[in-house]
Structure formats: C-alpha cells, structure tokens
Amino acid sequence: MPAMLKSLKSAARSTGFLLAALCCGSSTSFADDFKIALITSTTGAFEAYAKQAQIGLQLGLEYATKGTLKVNGRPIVVIQKDDQLKPDRARALIEESFQDDKADIAVGSTSSATTLAMMPVAEELKKPLVVDVAGADSITGDKWNRYVVRTGRTVGQEAMASASLLAAKDTSIAVLAQDYVFGRESAQVFKSAATKAGAAVVAEEFLPINTTDFTGVAQRVFDALKDRPGRKLLWVNWVGASPIAKINAMDPARYGIELATTAAPLQGMAAYKGIPNLTGATPYYYEVVTNPQNDWLVAEHKKRFNSPPDVGTAFAFDAALAIVNAVTATGGSDPEKLIAAFEGMSFEGSSGKLTIRKENHQALHDFYGVTYTTVPGVEWAVPKLLKAFSGEELNSMLTSMAKSK
C-alpha cells in the first residue's frame, strides 16, 4: 500500500485529529448539535479521494470555527458514511442521514455517479447537499436542483482550462477518458473548446474505470495521430490510477506525440515522473496557491501527518468553509435560509477564490496550467505553474461556448 494512503488511513483513525464532536451515528448527538453527514466512497477505486475528503472537511471546520468546532454556539457533529461507490447505497445513506440521523446538511460524494443518485433525495427532503469532490457537469447542469450546492470544480471547468492551455491551430489531439458520466462530459467540453481554438480532435477513446491493459487503445491513438502534421497530443483524463506511465512506456515520443493530463492525487502523480513535456490543468496543488487559507492548511497538514494536503483535501476544506459561512450568516440551520446564504457567496478557499453562482449553485473555480517536473527527493512529479485561469475567466469562456452552439 502506498505510504501516503497509509498516512490517510491513520489520519482518519487518529483520536488526536478527529473532531471533538465526531460520531458515527446519532446516539451521542443532541438536539442543539449541528450535524453534517459526510458521504464518501471510502471503499473502491476512489478510496484516496474519500480519505482526503474526510481529512479536509475536518480541517476546514477547525479553521472556519477558529478551533472551537462550534458554529453559532452549536457543537458540530460529523457523521461519516461509506457509499462503497454504489449509487443505490449512496441514495439510501443520504436518506438515512436526513431522516434517521437528523443531519442538517450532507456533504459528498467522491464519485459523480453516487452524487447524482443522492441529489433527488436532497430535493425530496428539502435539505442541502454540498458537493465537494464529484465533478460531472450535470450535477449543477441538467440534473441540478436548488438543494444542491457545489463548492468543488466541474469537469467543464477543468476541460476548458485544459483546452485553453493545450489547443491551438496546427495541433492534433486524441482524448482518452473513463467510460462514465465524468469522463464523457469532460471529453465533450474539451472537444468543443479545443475545436473552437483551432485544434483537431482526431480520436476519442472511453474505457471502463477498472481498465488495466491500455496496449490496444494506445496503439489506436498512436495510429490516429502519428501521420498528422504539426503538434500531436494525447490528453488523458483519468480518475484513480492513471495510465500515463503505461502509455509513456510504449514510447509515443517516437511518433512525436506528447502526453497531457488532468489533476491526480499526489500518489498518482508519482506516475508522472520522467514523462517528457507532460502538461495539464489542475484545480489545486499545495505549492501553487498562496493565501492565508492554504498556508494554514499546508502547515497544519504537514505538522500532523508529515505530508502536504492533496487535491481532495482542498475540495472538502473549502466545502467546510462555505458551510460555516452559511450557518453563521443565517444564525441557524433552516434549509431555505442556508440555500439563500450560499447563493452568491464569495470567499477565499484553499484552492483560490470561490464564488457560488446564484443561478445553479456552482462555484466559479480557479485552475492552474502546469508542467510536471522531476525534483530530487520528491516522490511525485512536481507541477510548475505555466498559467493561471480565474474562475470568472473560465466561466466567461464556458458561457460564450454554450451560446455559440
């Protein structure tokens, strides 16, 4: 097991770290507690992100409450639940959280598929669901309802930042993504943005989440790109164990093909080491963002776990800040007042400035175009900033592209 994942596991168990008000059910809770149900995919392919979200939410609540773990005088209780990457289970867990545990708000989930399954329950029971990690556009797009608030990024924002960084005239691009809602929605936006920028998207490949053999798909992509004039790129958008190293081992450089990719957890970025000219867009890296919120998160995470925070940690940290802001502003936990407080909320998070749109409750999220470098003594490839994209800038580009269709 990777050392960093072991650290995350021990962090989730550490009694010195867990919230003073943390519980695993409602039996020790009181009527004046403010209860948050944190639903993550702790079991399954996205375990690393789930562990990060658990830590990030806890640290964010600590930061936002100045260490009191109380909001408006009410102790915060976090009820953790594992949806096991199963949409039906996720739906049952959020229903259980709101009806049996009497949670005031839910946070999650790690997967877009499980999050989409939870959203109708939030609408039916009229309680807020704050989405931190899941990125599918449809969450705050055609599947959205007014009880859903997303403080995390979207695949559309990520794809737009990626296309803006990579696409240009005389550039041919192939896309490799996972065959589920996250991968397909991301590829759709990326293709539209890249084409608008003058690039040619010459191949799209979608594979199951648990794919381990990439030989055939890589060869198909190489064949589609190798005879194209100009710059040739393969853009890999993959959640979990990235196939980047396996594809690079097949020597795409012999055809003049460069590799590009999206954000990954730190342990996943170990696979990025030694890959020439690897570039991509990321919503967070602990050394790229400079503000008091991220400075505190980085310092505390390093002090407690001897490691820096990861991308999922930052997403959940920011969700905690938004929740405490909303509860403080409303003075209570009335769902309708909380929803109103989220609308238009703007604050500095660990990943940069976040502004939650009133019309669909989606946070405008900053992104960072980076190139990955190998640094002696660091176990993962280190992103170096090439260009920053503000949330407002990406929103404007996405809006313009939608209007032009």
Image: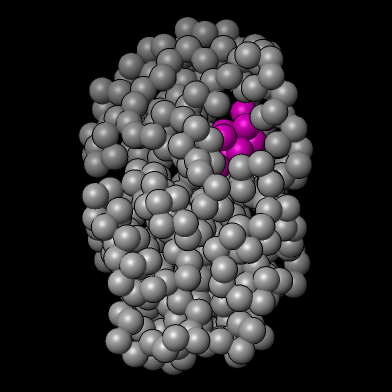
Locate the C terminus and report the quarter of the image it occupies: top right
358 left or right of 185 in image: right
Q: Residue at x 34, y 46 (%)?
A: 117
- Picture coordinates of residue 252, whole percent (x, y): 43, 25
Find out whether residue 156 is within the magenta segment: yes
Q: Quadrant of the N terminus?
A: bottom left
Quadrant of the rendered structure where residue 341 is? Answer: bottom right
Q: Which residue is drawn at the image coordinates 72% and 23% (left, top)?
A: 400
- Give the residue displayed 26% in from the left and 23% down from the top: 216
Q: Viewed as shown, does residue 271 lie left or right of 390?
A: left
Where residue 379 sits in the image (x, y, percent)?
46, 62
**Residue 270, image x and y in percent?**
43, 54
Q: Name the residue located 34 percent from the left edge and 34 percent from the top edge.
A: 180
Where residue 43 sits in the image (x, y, percent)? 25, 60
Left or right of 101, for residue 44: left
Q: Does residue 213 appear in this view? A: yes
